[in-house]
Image (cartoon, rainbow, N blue to C red):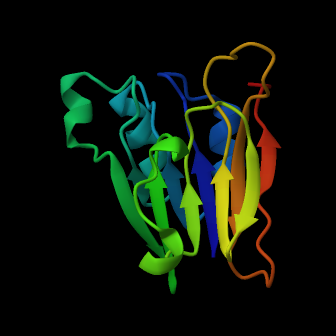
Amino acid sequence: MIVGLISDTHGLLRESALRALRGCELILHAGDVGDAAILEALGKLAPVVAVRGNVDTVAWAEVLLVTAVANAGSKKIYMLHDVHQLAVNPVASGYSIVVSGHSHKPGQMERDGVLYINPGSAGPRRFNLPITVARLDLERQTWQAEFVDVSQT
């Protein structure tokens, strides 16, 4: 199962991001969506689970939860926008993966058997940070997110 990870679109969904997420069986948006049309467009590719980010303050975004759990096969994935607001113990709660956004910095790390992933920002460029989404193949023995540069439209 390939899971697509995207965050911090801030109202901009690039065609290159859609291309990078094609073929994913599930798409997780880690907040700061910025426009409901983004979730609709992603939903044409695969089922979408999204959380609310700090810029998602208008009426349409009220339906988004601050945290969410996505089930990907037998794996439980915990989602929130800002990992610094993580208020659960992922190990004790049975989560295999934690997905967050907010920092606009793509990265991943493993701690206590839990993979923490930030797909980076797919929206407007901020500072000199890359513009990325990520793909995660849950069939691989050792999980490694593949970060995809989507700065080209």
- In this rendered view, identify the residue nearer to me: 151 or 65: 65
Whether residue 20 is situated above or below residue 59 in the rendered picture: below
Given residues 138 and 153, the one toward you in this image is 138
Q: In this view, does 124 lie to the left or right of 35?
A: right
Let me know if residue 45 appears in the view: no
Residue at the (32%, 45%) spot, across then down: 66
Check the image and report above or below for 91 versus 135.
Answer: below
Query: In which quarter of the view is residue 24 placed?
Result: bottom right
- Residue 136, compared with residue 44, is above or below; it is below
Q: Nearer the viewer, residue 36 or 120?
A: 120
Task: Determine the image quadrant of residue 23.
Answer: bottom right
Q: Residue furthest top?
A: 127
- Residue 114: percent from the left, percent from the top? 64, 71
Q: Where residue 123 sits: x, y (%)?
A: 60, 25
Count of residue discs? 0
Kindly identify the residue that appears in the image at 27 percent across and 33 percent down. 61
- Residue at the spot x=43%, y=60% of the render? 47
Q: Residue 136: image x %, image y %?
A: 70, 64
Q: Residue at x 46, y 79 (%)?
A: 92
The answer to whether 102 is drawn above or below residue 71 in the figure is above
Tell me the quadrant of the picture where the C terminus can be found.
top right
Q: Where is residue 43 in the image (x, y as percent from the top left)?
A: 43, 50
Q: Is residue 82 left or right of residue 21?
A: left
Q: In this view, does 18 lie to the left or right of 31?
A: right
For the N terminus, which image quadrant? bottom right
Whether residue 55 is visible, yes or no, is yes
Left or right: 17 in relation to 11: right
